[in-house]
Image (cartoon, rainbow, N blue to C red):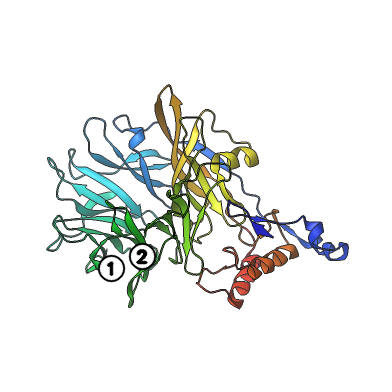
């Protein structure tokens, strides 16, 4: 068994792996998944909003997409939500001329975090939340020496809806992340006094993010742990110091974003774990480049974009990755496996993915002459089934053989619990996932 350039496993056929007697056990196999896929274009955007300025930041468990767009009549932001049941909804503003942005949400959708900036100069930015569709409510006044602040994400109910965001110093000081629990504001500081931001707040005890100077391109992924503080997570050698975490798994053991691999020296779709460090992926035969935007709660399905998917002038392609199938264009998966066509549209980028990894939202594009048109989309796929190690859509004894071989090679897949160690607990983890079956 080996890994190809897309980071997927390749295995011999099932009867090459076992004799006829052993293969009788295959009669005990179960089908891995009977779920289906879908693709919906999110049309009928409110007429005053620009489709090419739509950005999605988060997805709730019920499939509501949270994001921001810009108004045509003025360069001001508007928080938006979309669902298949309700279509587009504009989030309330403090006033019609205010610029607001929705940045993140709790999984249940009750709390949405963002920023609000007053006219006419749209300063200072203030951290806000919408609660059950009401608001926005200003969380706090930035403490000195910080002039501005904005909220980026909200933890889930089990953690008490803790808000994370950024305190902004308009002077020589560094911007630093904060946590706010509704009463107490905690300044997390920053490593070496550099500008630092958090990717997500999934577990308040451990946070992943990025620190450095974005103007010089000197960035590095970082981790903050309660009682320990900040630590740098390294990068890939060969092209200077650059790694960037844009999303994290529920337990913050997996981070996704960008690195600059040696030899090619361009930003690439990348995933980080403590045991394997940074790994980058692309689709063989296509230009290397892109970034990973988000990851499912379990850390095993990554979404974003990679290069060279469309006709010249080349477009990026919306990309999904998992350790069994490797990096693939979402458009190809939908068409080749489910017969779903995007027509003349190219699925360009995936901005966000749901906790369970089955729902995702992004932007499609097409060329009309020399101009690009944009169209938001919402797609669903069956959940990634970790226990189906060999990817044959059945769970049986061959998946155990597959996992054992993966473990012997110390692959990314074999670190089942993503805990930074390869040991017996990974076998126990795999056994538990096999017993649970596939969603």
**Helix, strand or loop under label 2:** strand
Residue 367: where, in percent of width, then height?
Answer: 45, 27
Task: Bin the neighbour count of mark 2 within 10 Å (Cα to Cα): few under 14, some 14-19, many 20 and up.
Answer: many
List the residue tagged with mark 1.
Answer: 191
User: Which of the 4 quarters of the picture holds residue 94?
Assistant: top left
**Helix, strand or loop under label 1:** helix
Direction top: furthest residue: 369
Q: Quadrant of the C terminus?
A: bottom right
Position of residue 328 in the picture relative to residue 162 (left or right): right
Circles 2 and 1, Cβ within 8 Å, touching? The answer is: yes
2 or 1: tag closer to the N-terminus: 1
Position of residue 175 in the picture relative to residue 313 (left or right): left
Q: Nearer the viewer, residue 315 or 205?
A: 315
User: Which of the 4 quarters of the picture holds residue 412?
Assistant: bottom right
Residue 112: where, in percent of width, then height?
Answer: 32, 53
Relative to 393, say whether 331 is above or below: above
Residue at horizontal 44 percent and vertical 42 percent from the top: 362
Q: Quadrant of the N terminus?
A: bottom right
Residue at horizontal 53 percent and vertical 45 percent from the top: 380
List the residue tagged with mark 2.
Answer: 222
Residue 313: where, in percent of width, then height?
Answer: 45, 30
Relative to 117, say whether 250 is above or below: below
């Amino acid at each position: 068994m080996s890994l190809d350039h897309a980071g997927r496993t390749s295995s011999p056929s099932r009867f090459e792996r076992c004799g006829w007697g052993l293969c009788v056990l295959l009669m005990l196999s179960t089908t891995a998944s009977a779920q289906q896929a879908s693709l919906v274009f999110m049309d009928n955007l409110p007429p005053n909003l620009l489709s090419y300025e739509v950005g999605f930041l988060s997805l709730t468990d019920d499939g509501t997409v949270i994001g921001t767009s810009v108004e045509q009549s003025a360069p001001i932001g508007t928080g938006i939500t979309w669902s298949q049941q309700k279509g587009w909804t504009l989030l309330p503003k403090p006033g019609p001329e205010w610029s607001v942005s929705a940045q993140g949400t709790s999984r249940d959708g009750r709390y949405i975090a963002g920023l609000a900036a007053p006219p006419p100069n749209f300063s200072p930015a203030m951290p806000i939340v919408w609660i059950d569709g009401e608001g926005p409510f200003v969380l706090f006044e930035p403490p000195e020496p910080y002039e501005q602040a904005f909220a980026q994400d909200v933890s889930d109910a089990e953690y008490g809806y803790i808000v994370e965001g950024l305190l902004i110093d308009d002077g020589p000081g560094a911007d630093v992340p904060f946590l706010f629990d509704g009463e107490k504001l905690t300044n997390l500081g920053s490593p070496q006094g550099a500008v630092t931001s958090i990717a997500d707040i999934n577990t308040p005890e451990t946070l992943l993010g990025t620190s450095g100077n974005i103007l010089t391109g000197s960035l590095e992924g970082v981790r903050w742990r309660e009682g320990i503080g900040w630590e740098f997570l390294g990068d890939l050698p060969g092209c200077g110091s650059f790694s960037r975490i844009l999303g994290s798994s529920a337990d913050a053991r997996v981070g996704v974003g960008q690195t600059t691999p040696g030899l090619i020296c361009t930003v690439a779709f990348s995933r980080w774990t403590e045991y394997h460090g940074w790994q980058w992926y692309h689709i063989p035969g296509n230009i290397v480049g892109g970034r990973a935007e988000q990851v499912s709660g379990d850390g095993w399905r990554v979404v974003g974009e990679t290069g060279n998917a469309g006709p010249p002038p080349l477009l990026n392609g919306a990309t999904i990755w998992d350790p069994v199938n490797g990096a693939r264009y979402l458009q190809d998966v939908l068409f080749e496996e489910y017969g779903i066509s995007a027509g003349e549209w190219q699925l360009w980028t995936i901005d966000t993915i749901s906790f369970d990894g089955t729902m995702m939202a992004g932007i499609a594009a097409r060329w009309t002459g020399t101009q690009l048109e944009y169209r938001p989309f919402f797609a669903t796929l069956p959940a990634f089934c970790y226990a189906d190690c060999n990817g044959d859509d059945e769970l049986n004894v061959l998946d155990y053989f597959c996992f054992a071989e993966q473990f012997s090679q110390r692959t990314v897949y074999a670190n089942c619990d993503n805990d930074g160690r390869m040991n017996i607990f990974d076998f126990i983890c795999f056994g538990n996932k096999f017993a649970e079956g596939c969603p």
